[in-house]
Image (cartoon, rainbow, N blue to C red):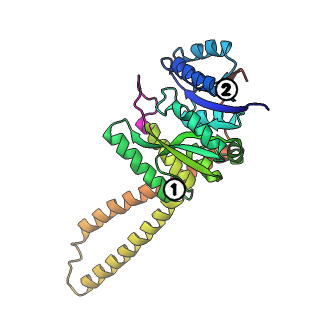
C-alpha cells in the first residue's frame, strides 16, 4: 500500500537565518513518521538576501523540497495560497512559518486527528508570546470576525491548519482574487477539530508582516466574508437621517413660535455639516472597499507570477 503524502507550505521573504532550521525540523519530524511521505514547499516572495541560494542548495540534495520563486513580492496571503493550490498531498499543512512561531511539533498530533476522520485540524492560539497591544488587538479582531461573518469560524485560529485534499479541491472552486485562507477552509464545510497551543515569540529578526499589512489582511477577511459593514452603514444612515428630520421639524416649530432666533442656528449648521460630511466620507470608504474587491475580482489577475519552480 502506497504511503500517504503530507504537504507542508512555508512562505518566505528574507528568511536566510531560519531556513535551514525550519527545513531540518520538518525533516526530523517525518523521519519518525515512517508511514508517511512528505513534500515541503517553500514559496519565496522575491527575497533580496541569501534565502533563495540556501533553498536551492537544500533542494539539490533533497527532492522532498520543492521551491516556487515569485517574480516579485505579491504579499503573504497570495504567496501562501499559491503554494497551497500547488500542493499534491493527501493532506496539506496550509502554513508552516519559517520562524516556527506555530509549533511544528504539533504536526504528528494533527495527522493523527486527520486520520480519525477530521478533514480540518486547526491550531487554536490559546496563548501568545507577544506585547499587550498586539495580543489584545488580535483577540478583539478574532472575536469580531466570529460574530460578523456567515462562516462558523472558531476564535483565535490562523492558517496553521492541516486540511484534507477534498477541502483543497473545494477551495479551488472559488476563484478569489483576495484569498483569506483561514476562513475559506471553514466555508468549505466538512468535519473539523482544534488543538490549543502557545504562539511563540520570534527567535530572531523582525516580522515582515507589519501593522499596515495586518490591517489590510484583517479588512480583507471582513469584506470577503461579511456584508455587515454595508448593512451597518445603511442602518446608521437611516438612523441619522431620521434624527436629522426630527431635529429640523423641532427647530422649525420653535422658530415659528419665537422660541429660537432664526440667526442662532448657524453654529449648529456648521457642526452638522462637518459631522455629516465625516459620516458620508466614512461610509463612502466602506463602499469603496467593496468596489475595490469587485474590481480586483473582475480583472482576474493571477495571484502571483512565478519565475521558477524547482523539484516539481
Q: Quadrant of the C terminus?
A: top right
State whether residue 260 is above or below residue 273: below
Q: Position of residue 284 (x, y in %)?
A: 47, 56
Give the number of the disc on residue 287: 1
Residue 34 seen anywhere in this rendered image of the structure? yes
In front of the other: 60 or 150: 60
Instruction: Specify which label sits upstream in the sequence, 1 or 2.
Output: 2
Count the marks: how many? Answer: 2
Q: Which residue is mark 2?
A: 34
Q: Secondary structure at mark 2?
A: loop
In front of the other: 224 or 28: 28
Q: Is residue 10 magenta?
A: no
- Which stretch is magenta? 199-212
Please tell me whether mark 1 or mark 2 is closer to you in this view. 2
Q: What residue sits 56% from the left and 19% below the top?
A: 24
Mark 2 neighbour class, 10 Å CA radius: few under 14, some 14 to 19, many 20 or more? few
Q: Quadrant of the N terminus?
A: top right
| Mark 1 vs mark 2, CA separation in Å | 53 Å
Q: Position of residue 309 (x, y in %)?
A: 70, 22
Q: Quadrant of residue 257?
A: bottom left
Q: Residue placed farthest to the bottom in the image?
A: 257
Q: Position of residue 207 (x, y in %)?
A: 43, 29
Mark 1 neighbour class, 10 Å CA radius: few under 14, some 14 to 19, many 20 or more? some
Q: What residue sits 65% from the left and 51% below the top?
A: 188
State whether residue 248 is above or below residue 198: below
Q: What residue sits 53% from the left and 14% below the top?
A: 50
Q: Residue placed farthest to the right in the image?
A: 1
Give the number of the disc on residue 295: none
Q: Secondary structure at mark 1?
A: helix
Amino acid at each position: 500500500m502506497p504511503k500517504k503524502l503530507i504537504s507542508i507550505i512555508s512562505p518566505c521573504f528574507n528568511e536566510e537565518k531560519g531556513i535551514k532550521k525550519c527545513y531540518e525540523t520538518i525533516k526530523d519530524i517525518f523521519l519518525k513518521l515512517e508511514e508517511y511521505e512528505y513534500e515541503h514547499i517553500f514559496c519565496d516572495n522575491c527575497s533580496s538576501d541569501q534565502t533563495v541560494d540556501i533553498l536551492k542548495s537544500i533542494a539539490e540534495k533533497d527532492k522532498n523540497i520543492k521551491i516556487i520563486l515569485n517574480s516579485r513580492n505579491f504579499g503573504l496571503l497570495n504567496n501562501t495560497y499559491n503554494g497551497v493550490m500547488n500542493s499534491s498531498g493527501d493532506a496539506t499543512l496550509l502554513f508552516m512559518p519559517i520562524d516556527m512561531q506555530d509549533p511544528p511539533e504539533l504536526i504528528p498530533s494533527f495527522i493523527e486527528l486527520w486520520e480519525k476522520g477530521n478533514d480540518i485540524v486547526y491550531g487554536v492560539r490559546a496563548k501568545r508570546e507577544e506585547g499587550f497591544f498586539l495580543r489584545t488587538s488580535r483577540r478583539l479582531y478574532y472575536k469580531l470576525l466570529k460574530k460578523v461573518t456567515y462562516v462558523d469560524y472558531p476564535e483565535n485560529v490562523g492558517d496553521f491548519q492541516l486540511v484534507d485534499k477534498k477541502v483543497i479541491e473545494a477551495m479551488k472552486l472559488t476563484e478569489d482574487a483576495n484569498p483569506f485562507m483561514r476562513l475559506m477552509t471553514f466555508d468549505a464545510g466538512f468535519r473539523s477539530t482544534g488543538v490549543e497551543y502557545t504562539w511563540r515569540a520570534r527567535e530572531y529578526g523582525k516580522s515582515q508582516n507589519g501593522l499596515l499589512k495586518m490591517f489590510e489582511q484583517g479588512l480583507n477577511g471582513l469584506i470577503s466574508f461579511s456584508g455587515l459593514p454595508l448593512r451597518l452603514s445603511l442602518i446608521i444612515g437611516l438612523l441619522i437621517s431620521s434624527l436629522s428630520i426630527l431635529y429640523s421639524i423641532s427647530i422649525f416649530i420653535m422658530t415659528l413660535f419665537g422660541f429660537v432666533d432664526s440667526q442662532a442656528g448657524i453654529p449648529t449648521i456648521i457642526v452638522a455639516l462637518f459631522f455629516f460630511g465625516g459620516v458620508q466620507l466614512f461610509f463612502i470608504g466602506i463602499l469603496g472597499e467593496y468596489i475595490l474587491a469587485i474590481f480586483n475580482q473582475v480583472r482576474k489577475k493571477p495571484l502571483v507570477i512565478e519565475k521558477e519552480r524547482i523539484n516539481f
